[in-house]
């Protein structure tokens, strides 16, 4: 139910302890206060998600909502080179 927009940040904590309480507070209040999100899981099928899978899910959903436009290569660009456009790094 979250709508991503250009300029949003995705912040992830460690697999074992999550984000520090101060970081969670900054994410829900103050100038950085976009909120926190949870990835829904059905306990029957998945015990847990590791950090890399969680990042992939969140980045994919943000990219999907933004029309993948930030992940397009410029003409003449080599896919093997690291590139940056606005705020998504690949």
Image: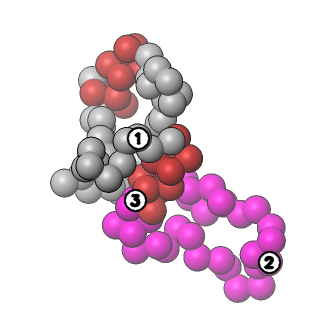
Query: What residue is disc 3 on?
Result: 62
Is disc 3 surrounded by few (<14), some (14 to 19) or many (20+) residues within 10 Å?
many
- The alpha-carbon separation of the residues under discs 1 and 2 comes to 36 Å
Where is the C terminus found, in terms of image quarters? Answer: bottom right
Total labels drawn: 3
Residue under the point 56% across and 56% down = 88
Q: Is residue 37 left or right of residue 20?
A: left
- The alpha-carbon separation of the residues under discs 3 and 2 comes to 24 Å
Q: Is residue 85 magenta?
A: yes
Residue under the point 50% across and 42% down = 50
- Depth check, mark 1 against mark 2: the one in front is 1
Please report contact status of discs 1 and 2: CB closer than 8 Å, yes or no: no
Query: What residue is disc 1 on?
Result: 48
Q: Which tag, 1 or 2, sits closer to the chain's start? A: 1
Where in the figure is residue 56, as x and y percent of width and height?
50, 55
Where in the figure is residue 33, as x and y percent of width and height?
30, 31
Question: Mark 2: which secondary structure?
Answer: loop
Q: Tell me the magenta residue range.
A: 61-90
Q: Is residue 87 magenta?
A: yes
Where is the N terminus found, in terms of image quarters? Answer: bottom left
Seen in the picture, residue 55 relative to 60 is either above or below; the reply is above
Question: Mark 3: which secondary structure?
Answer: helix
**Of all residues shown, which one is farthest toward the front?**
44
Residue under the point 37% across and 42% down = 47
Q: Is residue 27 visible?
A: yes
What main secondary structure does the magenta stretch of the protein show?
A: loop
* Quadrant hosting residue 60: bottom left
Which dot marks residue 78?
A: 2
Is disc 2 surrounded by few (<14), some (14 to 19) or many (20+) residues within 10 Å?
few
Q: Is residue 89 left or right of residue 44?
A: right
- The alpha-carbon separation of the residues under discs 3 and 1 comes to 21 Å
């Amino acid at each position: 139910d979250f709508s991503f927009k250009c300029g949003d940040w995705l912040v992830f904590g460690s697999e074992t302890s999550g984000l520090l309480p101060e970081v969670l507070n900054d994410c829900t209040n103050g100038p950085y206060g976009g909120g926190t999100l949870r990835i829904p899981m059905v306990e029957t099928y998945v015990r847990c998600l590791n950090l890399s899978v969680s990042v992939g899910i969140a980045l994919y959903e943000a990219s999907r909502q933004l029309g993948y436009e930030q992940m397009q290569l410029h003409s003449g660009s080599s896919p093997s080179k690291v590139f940056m456009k606005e705020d998504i790094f690949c």
